[in-house]
Amino acid sequence: MAKTYALSQKWGLFAGPLLCVAVAYLPALSFFQPKAQWAISIGLWMLVWWISEAIPMAATALLPLVLFPLVGLLDLKEAAAPYANPVIFLFMGGFMIALAMEKWRLHLRIALNIIRLTGTQAHTILLGMMCATALLSMWISNTATTLMMLPIASSIISLLTSESANLTSKQQANFALVLMLGIAYAASIGGIATLVGTPPNTVFAGFMAETYQYQVGFGAWMMVGVPFALLLLVATYGLLLVLYPSRIRHFEGAEALIQKQLADLGKMSRGETLTLAVFIATAFLWMGREYLIYWLPAMKNLTDTGIAMMAGVVLFVLPTDW
């Protein structure tokens, strides 16, 4: 429970239900069927609460479970059915893997190693940051990836401003700008590449399955999503360099900074190793599920959702201090 409420939250808390009731009984909408009018009203209530964050967003999403049966839109069983959609559990499994990576700081190790390999020139540092962000965002939420990469970028920018006195303020500002923008754009671009990269992807897959009975598999999505994401990443990288050129040939101290952060992480722990193994196995199963079913017909009922949940269960079972 929140200890204090911002003014917008207080307004939203009361504005949501009041707007719902007002729209539900608004004569101007009488050309709608009563149930349709109630559906619009409840949708507006949820929208106000989501925008104002009057209550936690996840709690707002539970309103249909209470209100739909209450006003006669759906019975409880029908209202609850979408919450058990296989797509929800696919996303849940992806979140479990992401949380395990964050807990053991595997995502940070992956990002730092990618940046280390790209070199210490300004444009290669940007490339490394964008590649690392996009790669992680394929499996972890865009927001979490961005929050993880920002401290790394801030450290590099601080090092640049403190140790590169020969650079103009314009060069420093442009480098800082492209680094921050590159992370933000790369996080969104990476989310396009996989089915679990961002919630709209799984929502679309669920819509296709329910409306057109067409199953969008993980591998099929990646066949389209990965090339498209690569094109966007390259285009964004080039555009940032053209619009905000820094012309920094060599960045003294960047390599030492990355090496220090890697040294601080130490050797890979047992938890990191097991998480990496589960992550790689899950990714291969997602991408090769159709081939696995072809060679092992007994696995015909294996789904992307089943693979995701299996990975989540395995992460709970594997011991880190046996």
Image (tube, rainbow, N blue to C red):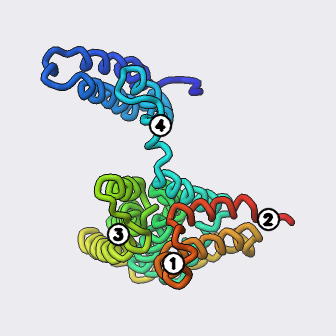
Check disc 3 and give the amino acid type: Gln
Amino acid type assigned to the residue bearing label 1 in the image: Ile
In the drawing, what numbered circle is on residue 293?
A: 1
Instruction: Please say if the residues under marks 1 and 2 sit with CB atoms less than 8 Å apart.
Output: no
Separation (CA) of disc 4 from disc 1: 32 Å
- Residue 171: which numbered mark, if any? 3
Which one is earlier in the sequence, the residue at label 2 or at label 4? Answer: 4
Q: Nearer the viewer, residue 115 or 44?
A: 44
Residue 98 left/right relative to 219: right
Give the CA separation, mark 1 to mark 2: 32 Å
Q: Local crowd at mark 4 within 10 Å, few (<14), some, or many (≥20)?
A: some
Q: Amino acid at mark 4?
A: Ala
Front disc: 1 or 2? 1
Q: Earlier in the sequence, mark 3 or mark 4?
A: 4
| Front position among marks 2 and 4 | 4
Q: Residues within 10 Å of mark 2 (few under 14, many from 20)?
A: few
Which residue lies at the image location 74% right of the left edge and 67% below the top edge? 271
Residue in the image at 46% along x and 67% along y: 138
* Element assignment for label 1: helix
Q: Disc 3 versus disc 1: distance between alpha carbons? A: 54 Å
Tag shown at residue 80: 4
For the residue carrying disc 1, how many other residues have a C-alpha within 10 Å: few (<14), some (14-19), or many (20+)? some
Q: How many marks?
A: 4
- Residue type, mark 2 in image: Thr
Q: CA distance from mark 2 to mark 4?
A: 37 Å
Mark 2, residue position: 320
- Upstream in the sequence, badge 2 or badge 3? 3
